[in-house]
Image (cartoon, rainbow, N blue to C red):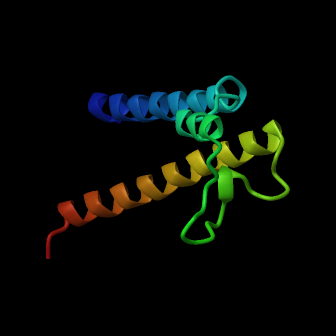
Amino acid sequence: MSKNNKLNQKTVLIGLIVALIFVILGVFCFSYAQEMLDLQAEELGLEAQPIYDPPFPDYNILGFENKWSTLIIGVTSVLLLFVVTFAVAKLLSKKKRDPK
């Protein structure tokens, strides 16, 4: 394995670990924070009237309201995004090496 390839693998692994750390911090440290627009609307006595029914109102999935299930969803999402991105990168690099 070449030195450049080892460096790329190490960089990808560090990036994945950092992303997972951000998920953990987001769930346990920053999830209590309210959005500023929501606070201002409450002070003015305004209520939201959405123009459509969003699939996940207030970013909640029914049945997954506690922090542990939110952490599992976050980690799963990061890993799924990593796998899809890695697969696309492999396909593109293979296509670049074998032009037809």
Q: Residue most toward the front?
A: 44
- Closer to the camera, 75 or 61? 61
**Residue drawn 68% across and 23% down?**
29
Question: Residue sitting at 72 percent across and 52 percent down?
Answer: 60
Query: How many labels, in total?
Result: 0
Q: Residue furthest bottom?
A: 100
Which part of the image, by quadrant, shows the C terminus?
Answer: bottom left
Residue 84 percent location from the top left of the image: 48, 58
Could you tell me which residue is drawn at 74 percent across and 57 percent down? 61
Q: Residue 71 in the image: x percent, y percent?
A: 73, 39
- Above or below: residue 38 compared with residue 99: above
* Residue closest to the eye, 39 or 28: 39
Side of 4 where 21 appears, left or right: right
- Which one is in front, 20 or 53? 53
Left or right position of 21 against 68:
left
- For residue 85, above or below residue 91: above
Residue 41 figure quarter = top right
Q: Quadrant of residue 88?
A: bottom left
Q: Is residue 92 left or right of residue 9?
A: left
Residue 59 lies, with reference to residue 14, above or below; the image says below
- Return the x and y of residue 1 as percentages of the image width and height: 35, 36
User: Residue 98: x percent and y percent?
Assistant: 19, 67
Residue sticking out furthest to the top: 29
Query: Relative to 38, is 82 on the left or the right?
Result: left
